[in-house]
Image: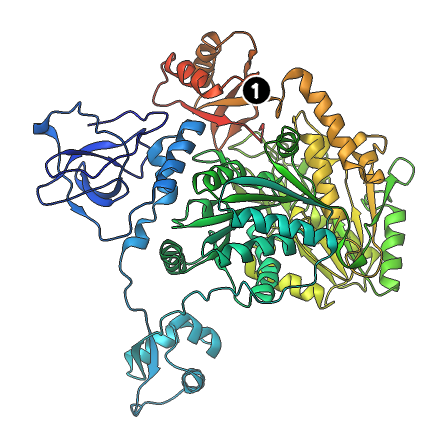
Amino acid sequence: MFRKPSEQTALGIPQAAGMRVPVLLPYPFAGPFDYRVPHGMQLAPGDLVLVPLNRREEVGVVWDGEADGNVGDNRLRPVSSKIDALPMRQDLRRLIDWIASYTLAAQGEVLAMALRVNALRPDQALLGWRAADPLPDIRLTAQRQAVLAQLAQRQPRASAELATASGVSTGVIRTMADAGLLLPAPLPVLPGFIRPDADRPGPTLSPDQHVAAQTLREAVASRSFSVTLLEGVTGSGKTEVYHEAIAECLRQGRQALVLLPEIALSSQWLDRFTARFGAAPAVWHSDLSSRTRRLTWRAVSTGEATVVVGARSALFLPFPDLGLVVIDEEHETAFKQEDGVVYHARDMAIVRARLCQAPAILASATPSLETVSNVEAGRYRRLHLPKRHGGAEMPEIHLVDLRDHPPERGDFISPPLIAEVHAAFERGEQAMLFLNRRGYAPLTLCRRCGHRMQCPNCTSWLVEHRARRQLACHHCGHTAPIPTNCPACDAESSLTAVGPGVERITEEAVRHFPAARTLVMASDTLPGPASAGEAARAIAAREFDLIIGTQIVAKGWHFPHLTLVGVIDADLGLAGGDLRAAERTVQLLHQVSGRAGRAEAPGRVLLQTFTPEHPVMQALKAGDLQAFMENEAAQRRPGNWPPFGRLAALIVSADTPDAADLVARDLGRTAPSGDGILVLGPAPAPLAILRGRHRRRLLLKTRRDIAVQPLLRTWLASVGIPGAVRVDVDVDPVSFL
């Protein structure tokens, strides 16, 4: 009954009753299972069906290609029923096959990302509360009166909303219902998605923007596949340019998808989109309620939602006519999914655009070396916006050599940076301090015995979060209270924080700038788009003077009154042996520098560094990122390192080190070899223990003209892997932890 996947499945045809049909299920199966088509049922590839699996019934999709035929008719189980829903379109099925083949993931596991089973279930009427009329003769407390007063303004209302508006608990609502004061009533249906107005006048474009926008409009109107890099300095108006491409897509009657690396960036993006088109787009991310996700999924599938902005999972939405794909901040590593199916959303978005015969736009001020290489090879087109919009100038960047200007003992902000922040405040301007490290301190150790607080599940230090009075592992989520005594030597009050996080910088900033109104922007202080949007509104309204943040502040924001950016530790990303460490550091620091001086007032950036002579620092100071990228390419090309070669990682993990070592050793002995092929390892991964599992890593490196997938399949098939050991495959790895 099991059918092995092929590299490219043939297009299927409708199945006659009584025949076999392959059905793919949203579980980690390597391919479809065969089922029998009952008499009277007609099925075609893409149809959604209910089929038996063990002792339960599951939703699956009739897949392309021929049935396997290895199971006898007497053992073949029939399809239970055909689901009354829109079929899964061919381009989405082909995308699932493509991702499974490229990443070596199970087809069913990829299908699970695209098949929203809950969206197929009919909606039940949602109930809220209205006031009884007449009210029963019951004593009304102050809390009950507050609830009734809210209902007098508007009813019906949901329990949680009514309780919040009234300042009472939901228990009070339940008690009033039991007493007959409140009666259930259906809540109004949420409004549908309003179609954005493509012809609504947009902002006046500069000559450079106009040329780029016209080129993109023509690409969309051609209704054919292409890839364009939209490169421009920070603040050059790239978003306004690709808005014109979205407008043309709407005029063509097709749908547009915009992928953002951080959904926290969506708040200001949504405001700008709504101002341009007069209506908000559909939004897709993990913070949506299950009902909103279900309604959005359906609206996309019917074409009601014409523009979608979302995180990488939006790539798998069921667009009936996708006419444009935009990947904003295309260089961001957040587009790489590291758990489950390991894929890069930027690259897979380009594949989906090709399958839909739609143009793809990659937007970035600091494009990745992979994208630049594709431009130079002629595979991608390049549009460049060299100037900031509206006459604003790029900020001046200065290097603060911490060897010459060290902070006070125990501090981390240098005297030159302190002076610049004071000067910005005196001019009535805002300042930002940037450190890409959450919490209070990255390490806690004992001054007496040297013991370091380490995660019990990972080979990583516990990060102190003083505001929460916790030590936390940022890899597995383990938390523990901050102990009063050293766990190793029991010395009292001997534990000390080593190094700074944003909490510690905030503590220091309060001492230096006591009158400043300070806001901390980090993923644990701004947990979702709503809180990020409120923070952006407050900054724009000048309710804060000083913003202290991690990488969440580095990209996409427009703060018109922010003129000074100070980077506390510009050297932070250069540590370790990461292949892309220098590239990522220059991208991050250029992006955060770009937050300064985006309006009339000029911007200044101070980078605190112990290595001002480093090529990254010199490139940032000179504003010559192109020369830096050319030098980076020259260093990678001779060794066939990406993008001039291919990489794939095998990560062996097991509950015991011996089990991991045994499989890793066998993989090392059977590793592929040949001209242009090199295998590094096995060796302990940098995070040798993660979530309690011991990890070993092997790295396959080949010339660019050698496909790694066939090598990996043959390699993995040559080694017996016990059930207690897992081997994860990461094609085109971004992280080397």
The answer to whether 321 is drawn above or below residue 492 in the figure is below
Percent position of residue 471, x then y: 59, 43
Question: Label 1: which residue?
Answer: 704
Name which quarter of the figure residue 144 lies in: bottom left
Q: Residues within 10 Å of mark 1 (few under 14, many from 20)?
A: some
Q: In the rendered view, does 233 fall on the left or right side of 63? A: right
Which residue is pictured at 41% across the width and 83% down the height? 151
Percent position of residue 165, x then y: 48, 77
Percent position of residue 233, x then y: 74, 47
Q: State which quarter of the image contains the N terminus.
A: top left
Name which quarter of the figure residue 638 lies in: top right
Which residue is pictured at 52% across the width and 64% down the height? 280
Which residue is pictured at 43% across the width and 39% down the height? 355
The answer to whether 456 is drawn above or below residue 559 in the figure is above
Q: Nearer the viewer, residue 190 or 496?
A: 190
Which residue is pictured at 88% across the width and 63% down the height? 426
Q: Amino acid at mark 1?
A: Arg
Q: Is residue 40 visible?
A: yes
Percent position of residue 566, x then y: 80, 48
Q: Count all numbered tags in the image, as a single digit.
A: 1
Q: State which quarter of the image contains the C terminus.
A: top right
Q: Is residue 473 visible?
A: no
